[in-house]
Image (tube, rainbow, N blue to C red):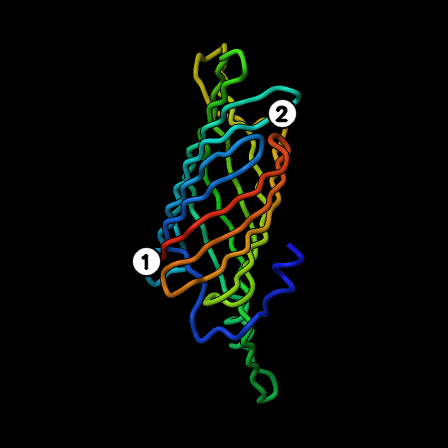
Amino acid sequence: MIFFLLGSTIAHSDEEGYEYTYLELTANYSENVGYNGVLSANIPSLPFYIKATIAEEDVKSQGDQYKKSTEALSFGVHASITDILNGVSKSGLSFSFDAFLDVYAEIGVNRWEIENSVSTTEDGNDAYLRAGIKMGDPTAWEYDLYVEKTKLAELVIDPATNTSKYSLSSETNNNIGIRVTTHLGKNLATSFGYSNDDFAGSTLSLGARLSF
């Protein structure tokens, strides 16, 4: 990560912002090679986007090997700190910042299924929250620092009324990561990432992105 950060510069924006409408395919490596697909669509003229994710991976946790599949749907909001600062003026002075900086947050739900080494299968649903910042040049080198938090949504049945409802578990799974994206043109980019998850441990990723 230090090599990537020092090997590039945070250049000016050329009046282009970060992409939130794209298709990205990623190969992940934890205990074995897994795959991740993301389809994100920004709502026109609004700072909101919808993102769908599917993933298949092999992970190791608490001494056992698992095959894990995930399907997630989330709603996101993003804002450019650069645009906000450039719109501020004081005592007749205006500011002009070229370096881009976006903040974003996503909320959604994960549906997951895991199978251990003796073919015992478990599944469930998680409430999902992700927050992060994007910095750098959205036409060249771009950096995404993020934190994900998920809580298991448990189905609880009230014995008195026989009604069911979901409640969130007390345990939170945390995932912290960085992704470095290199833009090869207007619509094509590659990415390299590293993340550390409470359940799965460390993961490396290499991906390709097509923007629309």
**Toward the viewer: 207 or 151?**
207
Give how far across and how far down residue 190 sits, in percent.
Answer: 46, 54
Which residue does the numbered mark 2 point to in the structure image? 61
Placement of 185 over or under 61, stated as above or below: below
**Toward the viewer: 111 or 75?**
111
Residue drawn at the location 56% of the way across and 84% of the way down:
94
Residue 51 is left or right of residue 99, and the answer is left
Query: Toward which corner of the image does residue 152 lie, by quadrant?
Result: top right
**Label 2: element kind:** strand
The single residue placed furthest to the bottom in the displayed view is 92
The disc placed on residue 66 is none
Residue drawn at the location 58% of the way across and 39% of the way down:
203
Residue type at mark 2? Ser
Task: Please give the count of numbered marks on the rendered protein.
Answer: 2
Please state, as top left, top right, bottom left or bottom right, where the C terminus lies in the image.
bottom left
Q: How far apart are the alpha carbons under marks 1 and 2?
A: 38 Å
Query: Toward which corner of the image does residue 4 lie, by quadrant?
Result: bottom right
**Label 1: element kind:** loop
Residue drawn at the location 57% of the way across and 81% of the way down:
95
Residue 116 is left or right of residue 111, and the answer is right
Question: Dot 1: few (<14), some (14–19), or many (≥20) neighbours within 10 Å?
Answer: few
Give how far across and how far down residue 29 sits, in percent.
Answer: 54, 37
Give how far across and how far down residue 69 sits, in percent.
Answer: 45, 28
Residue drawn at the location 54% of the way across and 31% of the way down:
32
Quick one: label 1 or label 2, which is nearer the N terminus? 2
**Residues tagged 1 and 2 counted as in contact (Cβ below 8 A):** no
Which residue does the numbered mark 1 point to in the structure image? 212
Please state, as top left, top right, bottom left or bottom right, where the N terminus lies in the image.
bottom right
Placement of 205 over or under 2, stated as above or below: above
Residue type at mark 1? Phe
Query: Toward which corner of the image does residue 16 lie, by quadrant?
Result: bottom left
